[in-house]
Image (cartoon, rainbow, N blue to C red):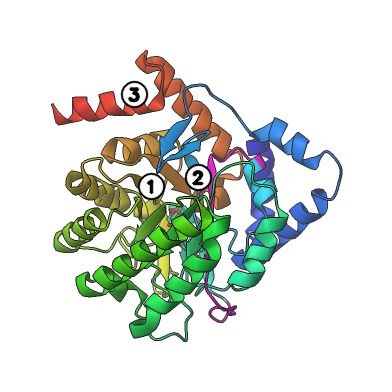
Amino acid sequence: MTTCASYRLLRPLLFRLPAETSHHLIFSTLRLIYRLPGASTLTRAMFARRSASLPVSVMGLRFPNPVGLAAGLDKNAEYIRPLSDLGFGFLELGTVTPRPQPGNPKPRLFRLPQQAALINRMGFNNVGINQFLANLVRADKPCPVGINIGKNRDTPVERAVEDYHAALQAAYPHADYIAVNISSPNTAGLRNLQNEDNLEELLHTLKAEQTLLAEKHGRYVPIALKIAPDLDDGQIAAIARLVLEHKFDAVIATNTTITRTGIANDPLAHQSGGLSGRPLKSLSTEIIRRLYSHLQGNVPIIGVGGIENADDAWDKLVAGADLIQIYSVLIYTGPCVVQTIVHDLAERVQVSGLSTLAEAVAQARRRKSD
Ligand SMILES: Cc1cc2nc3c(=O)[nH]c(=O)nc-3n(C[C@H](O)[C@H](O)[C@H](O)COP(=O)(O)O)c2cc1C
């Protein structure tokens, strides 16, 4: 039986439990399995796929393939080895805040199986940057690892820059890249940091600190900005201008949406929080397309939102993404989805007759603009 088929059998049982309980059950089982010798080798043999056409260089880093894990699944850097054994090209861990915090009261995560979607209002539950880094340094890192940073709930938005500054300083020596999350809908006021004046101050402070840290540690660690899908054209243009002006290294588009398009009739639609998965797909692709029209390839884009297969990943790449990330589809399709997307992307490159994914995507973008 394939691993996808095994997950299809297990899924009805997991879905009988509250979403967060299933999550903890899966990960505690994984922790036990990984105590056994050979667990990592076996998982890698079952899941990870290599392809000569898929390695990509983005932000000055080399990625074995462009399919990454989106932030929020491994908030405390506890499962780096098992997750990388699934064949991800990179992992984004966090969001981590300077101090530990419990997040919002449960229930705070809801499944909408009809739409292959999730609504979450987790609220940055995490162990805080010190414990996070203690976990991270203990693990070996077989693929590039990004650290996604945020502000604590009880830090007023006017002082948010201090939290990002502190988290950047602590995380910098341990990260391959840093993601600055100003787009979670579950921390009051956080998204206001996307407004022009606030963003100007934030980007200026972080860029200056990055320069100092690069000198101190003798290593340049790129910084990416993670944005929401709920932005109008003017806001996208302003963000693009500031990212270019402050020479940020990438934009991650997008986080979850506060809209309820496509799920209005679902009994869970009224739950507050961010919506992810299938209903987010076209919205986030459209944001990537608009962002790319401003950035023109001068700042790379990491595309995320509703990707379920290689066709969806391809759409985001052709719209302007250089890398992609997934989260919700793992809950609905299972861990085998990583190898399926990697395999099918490699096949697309082969069919194009070109030798790398970057070339095939560039060709598709040219054809689209003709
Ligand atoms: C349960 C859950 C928790 C999340 N937590 C975070 C987080 O801590 N930080 C963050 O930047 N994004 C977080 N996200 C957003 C994802 O990283 C991603 O941007 C979003 O889910 C869209 O991708 P998807 O449709 O493939 O799930 C979370 C998403 C979910 C479903």
**Residue 31 placement, left or right of 147:** right
Residue lying at the far right of the rendered structure: 37
SS class of the residue under badge 3?
A: helix
Q: Report if residue 294 is visible in the image.
A: yes
Residue 266 at x, y = what percent? 41, 65
Mark 1, residue position: 302
User: Residue 100 in magenta?
Assistant: yes
Q: Is residue 50 above or below residue 146?
A: above
Cα separation, mark 2 vs mark 1, equals 9 Å
Asked whether the residues under the numbered discs 2 and 1 touch, taking CB atoms below 8 Å apart as contact, a structural biologist would say yes
Q: Mark 1 vs ligand 1: CB under 8 Å?
A: no
Q: Report if residue 18 is visible in the image.
A: no
Res. 202 image quadrant:
bottom left
SS class of the residue under badge 1?
A: strand
Residue 249 at x, y = what percent? 35, 50
**Residue 156 placement, left or right of 73:** left
Going from N to C along the chain, the mark reached first, 3 or 1, is 1
Residue shown at 35% from the left, 64% from the top: 208
Residues rendered magenta in the picture: 85-106
Q: Nearer the viewer, residue 37 or 111?
A: 37
Cα separation, mark 3 vs mark 2, equals 19 Å
SS class of the residue under badge 2?
A: strand
Q: Is residue 365 above or below residue 327?
A: above
